[in-house]
Image: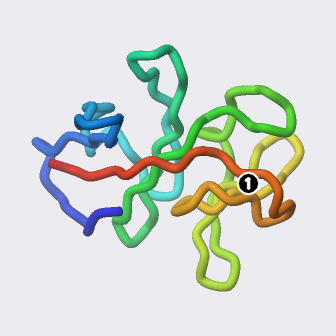
Amino acid sequence: MTLALETTDLKVQLQLADDWFTVCDLSALIPGRGVAALLPDGRQVAVFQDRSGSLYALDNRDPFTGAAVLSRGLTGTDQGRPFVASPLLKQRFDLATGECLDDETVRVRAYEVRAR
């Protein structure tokens, strides 16, 4: 996560292995909505900015259906935990950890994300 920043020159970056990968301009993110991006290895990531300006990134693939749709999910909070709900079967995934709030045995990968 990172603090709220309001500069159009900032880039959203993900930690991949030992390096940072630039995903998009910070200005491309709309608070409360996700965007999908393609990683160098062909996987997709869902990137979110919440209304407080914090950034999150998760694998975009819904583990329950196999569809790459988490970036299109609805965001919210549950007991102070920010989440995205899959648009298909509605399972909720913690934006910070990737843990499924509806089935503790399931999770998606969460990425360290920053704006620089």
Would residue 85 appear left or right of 59 to someone viewing this image?
right
| Amino acid type, residue under disc 1 in the picture | Ala
Would residue 73 appear left or right of 41 to someone viewing this image?
right
Relative height, residue 21 to residue 38 (above, below): below
Q: Give the percent coordinates (x, y) of residue 96.
A: 52, 63
Identify which residue is drawn at 32% across, 42% down. Answer: 15
| Quadrant housing residue 2 | bottom left
Quarter containing the N terminus: bottom left
Relative height, residue 105 to residue 62 (above, below): below
| Quadrant housing residue 101 | bottom right
Identify which residue is drawn at 64% across, 67% down. Answer: 76
How many labels were placed on the picture?
Answer: 1
Would residue 77 appear left or right of 104 to someone viewing this image?
left
Q: Give the percent coordinates (x, y) of residue 70.
A: 66, 40
Pointer 1 residue: 85
Q: Give the percent coordinates (x, y) of residue 21.
A: 27, 31
Q: Residues within 10 Å of mark 1 (few under 14, many from 20)?
A: many
Relative height, residue 110 to residue 75 (above, below): above
Which structural element holds mark 1? strand
Would residue 105 appear left or right of 32 to someone viewing this image?
right
Q: Give the percent coordinates (x, y) of residue 58.
A: 54, 45
Identify which residue is drawn at 71% across, 51% down. Answer: 107
